[in-house]
Image (cartoon, grey):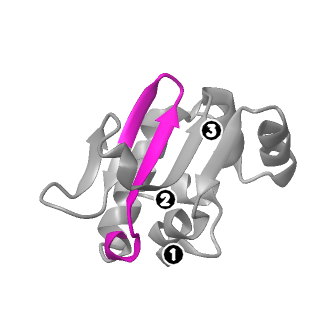
Amino acid sequence: MATPQAIGSAYFLKLLQHALKSNPTALTRAPGNLVFQLGTASWTLVTKGAVLGLQSGIIDEEKVCFAMIATEDGLNDYLSGDDERIQRALGAGELGFHGKFEFFSAIFAPAQGKSMLSLRASNF
């Protein structure tokens, strides 16, 4: 089993896919795409058009309403749910959010009250 320090982008993507399955209407709330640059890889959550869902690479960058950029360490700090680690990662430039964060958080709305770490530990 992966430790919180070794969750990485692959696990984050599984969490994101699980959240989308649990809350399929979240995509309709976003006015544009959500982009995730995690380590050296990138994904776009396409919210409008023929190809909805999580796609590899950056697609329709002019339609982006939110972007998350993180190193692997910054992502692990975010997923830990520890405010001090998150603030350190933000201050060190290892984690960044640009645009309308509420659209990103809406995807995880069914899990409100749970930390990202408890989401990670849930059975999906």
User: Quick check: 74 above or below 118?
Assistant: above
Say which residue label 2 marks: 122
Q: Secondary structure at mark 1?
A: helix
> Compared to 22, does 17 lie above or below?
above
Start-end of magenta stretch = 27-43
The reply to whether the magenta stretch includes residue 32 is yes
Task: Name the residue type under label 1.
Answer: Ala
Q: Is residue 5 at least partly visible in the picture?
A: yes
Q: Earlier in the sequence, mark 2 or mark 1?
A: 1
Residue at image location 30% in from the left, 66% down from the top: 21
> Horizontal and vertical percent for residue 110?
48, 77
Which quadrant holds residue 43? top left
Q: Which residue is mark 1?
A: 109
- Callout 3: helix, strand or loop? helix
Q: Is residue 124 visible?
A: no
Residue lying at 71% horizontally and 32% vertically, measured from the top left: 94
42 with respect to 121 (left or right): left
